[in-house]
Amino acid sequence: RMGHLGVNSILLTKFANLLIIMIDKMKKVRFAALFAAFVSVIGFSSCLGDDKTESYDLYDYVTLTDVAGSTSRLKSMISDTYGLTLEPQNESVIKALKLTDGTYYERAYVGVKLVEDIEPTRTKYTVSEMQVVEAIPYQGFNQNPDTLDAKGYGNHGFTAVSKNTWAKTGFLTVPFELRVLDKHASTFYKDIHMYIDKASNDTLYTRLRYVRENMEGMAYQFLMSFKLPKANPLYYQMRPKNDSIIIKVTAPYNEFQNVESFAKCRFSELVAY
């Protein structure tokens, strides 16, 4: 017969396990709420900003790229939320995104001042001034995923992947929370990899990996874009209806559990940029 001490021990163990599960769920809810609040604050900044930002007509995540049919010799910006083509009035407008080697940084959250008045049916505008609010880290999809676990890492560390993941202008942008020892390390983002795992009729399955040892680190929140491959043999396995597909992102929480998110995308956009 088990004594009171044994019973109490079992109850305490069950309570501790329940508490761990509750804390884990609260962290994930908190992360989603914080990211939603972050997006809301930025979205309203064009209306409620101080004197420095009131002059900007639009704030959005953009991709700097060559646009087919554009009359400008300069790279244009395509906005994620509105799908607008934003053509710089001159080279000085986008100089903040120009790198030392003469190329341009491709992803950013910016505020822009437009030459033309905003109209509901207009899709192209000229930009006279731009403010880079935040440069968004980005890189291409990894084409050799079999090498990612060579060091024994890559199977843990992600505590959340936000449901606000989105796929626009040729990039899959993922807000996530990750345990990391040093988030300021110069090579940090190079150690984060995204790759295509498989494909079905209307779903593209992707996986997110961090290939450094990080179990002892603190959990930090990040936002990163991954350039979708223009061509992949798995695309031919897809048979989407109405040009609509889902991109599923799976990241390892530990060796036995994953966190995941989904983004909707047009199949035609997947290979358009």
Image (tube, rainbow, N blue to C red):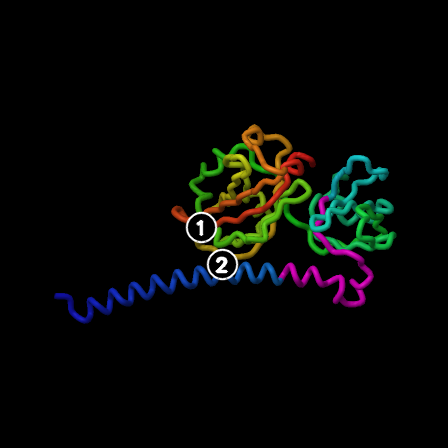
For the image, the number of numbered tags is: 2
Is 169 positioned to the left or the right of 131 in the image?
A: left
The reply to whether residue 22 is visible in this rendering is: yes
Indicate whether residue 238 is drawn in magenta.
no
Task: Give the mark nearer the N terminus: 1 vs 2.
Answer: 2
- Which range is magenta? 38-63
| Amino acid identity at mark 2 | Lys
Q: Is 10 placed above or below 135 here?
A: below
Which residue is denoted by mark 2 in the rendering? 28
Nearer-the-camera pick, 268 or 208: 268
Q: Quadrant of residue 46?
A: bottom right
Residue at the location (77% across, 38% down)? 67
> Is 94 left or right of 106, judged from the image as shown?
right
Q: Position of residue 21 (x, y in %)?
A: 39, 60
Q: Amino acid at mark 1?
A: Tyr
Q: Is residue 173 above or below residue 146?
A: below
Residue displayed at 45% across by 38% down: 149
Residue 146 on image: x %, y %:
48, 33
In this figure, which residue is indicated by the disc labeled 1? 253
